[in-house]
Structure formats: structure tokens, C-alpha cells
Amino acid sequence: MRNRHLLILLAACFGCDSGVGRQASSAKQSSLENGQPSLRALAELALQAAEAGDALALNSLRVTEREYKELFFPEFPEAGPGHNIPCDFHWYHLNVRSLKGVQDVIDEHAGRKYELLDVIATQGVESFKTFKAHKKVELKVRLSADGAEVQIRLFGSVMERAGEFKILSFPS
């Protein structure tokens, strides 16, 4: 079973897309592939995918390599003068950690049922020139099993650009 999840995750790296959350209308051209209209909508889809154990759906909510390299990384401090580590290196490490993180989310949350109560950027929101980073996002949820309210962390930061939201990474 674990090998099947690994194969699904590897397929996600090479452009496979489950289409979860994709808007039916193609009239609106999105700068972010499968970008969601709000932080809450993104969190709801991530919760649904985690509950279903759907690695492809979780990965479809994450920033793509193109988005990271072309839209986000150029504005990060690591891209500025005095930093000699290439963007490819940063993407590689972010991607590898995220693939493991998606599996961790599935291992911990698949089969559970949650009701989303709130979405909290525990380290605030950082503004950049063309986007915002909602840092260290946690979800306040109610457990269907016993009604308990808890905070869980499915993913790390969320990127907001032109009114669209995507997960930056799934920490492992």
C-alpha cells in the first residue's frame, strides 16, 4: 500500500493532475494552476483530500515548479544579492520534503472526518511585491468521532497571488 502511495506521489511530480477543485469555467485565466478563491476554500479541499487519502488531490493544491521558480522565488530574500544557492536547489528540497509530507498527511488523517472551523496563519502574513505568504497555517477543526475541537497542521505556508491561494509545501 505504501509503495502505491509513493508511485502516486512520483506521478504527481511529473505533471499528473487529479483535477480536484478545478473551476469549470475556463473564462477566468488563472496565474496559479488550480488556485483557489480563498484560504478557507483551499483548506476545505485539502481536508477532503486528506480524509480521502488522495495524494494526487493534495499535490494539485500545491505550488507547481513553474509557479515557484517564475512567480515566487524571485521575490524571496534567498534570490537576492549575496545568495549563491540556485533556485533549482531550493525547489528540489521543497519538493522532496513536500512529497514526504503528503504521505505523512495521508498516514495521519486518511479515514478521519473533520469539520473545518477556522484557518489560522500562526506566524502571520508576510507581504511581498506581487504576493502574500500566510505563514505556518493550521486548521481549527471539530473531530466527527467525538466532537472535540483541535488544531491540526496539514500543510505549511499558503501563497496568495492575485486573489488565488495555493499551498507552498507539505512539511515532513
Image: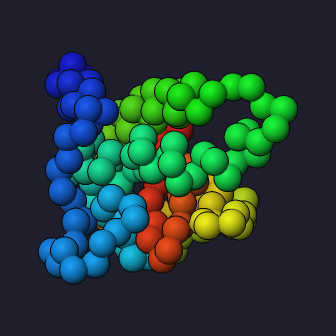
Which of the pair 148/152 is nearer the observer? 152
- Residue 97 in the image, given as x and y percentages of width and height: 49, 30
52 lies left or right of 171: left
Indicate the colouring scheme.
rainbow
| 79 shown above or below 23 | above
Which of the pair 161/148 is nearer the observer? 161
- Residue 99 in the image, given as x and y percentages of width and height: 39, 32
Q: Residue at x 30, y 51 (%)?
A: 60
Residue 38 seen in the current view: yes
- Residue 53 in the image, given as x and y percentages of width and height: 24, 44
170 lies left or right of 123: left
The furthest residue to the right? 82
Q: Residue at x 73, y 39 (%)?
A: 78
Q: Residue at x 22, y 31 (%)?
A: 11
Which of the pair 138/112 is nearer the observer? 138
Residue 115 seen in the current view: no
| 88 shown above or below 136 | above
The furthest residue to the top? 3
| 36 shown above or below 10 | below
72 lies left or right of 125: left
The N terminus sits in image quarter = top left
- Residue 42 in the image, given as x and y percentages of width and height: 39, 66
Give the number of callouts.
Answer: 0
Q: Residue at x 50, y 74 (%)?
A: 162
Which of the pair 90/1 is nearer the observer? 90
Q: Quadrant of residue 14?
A: top left
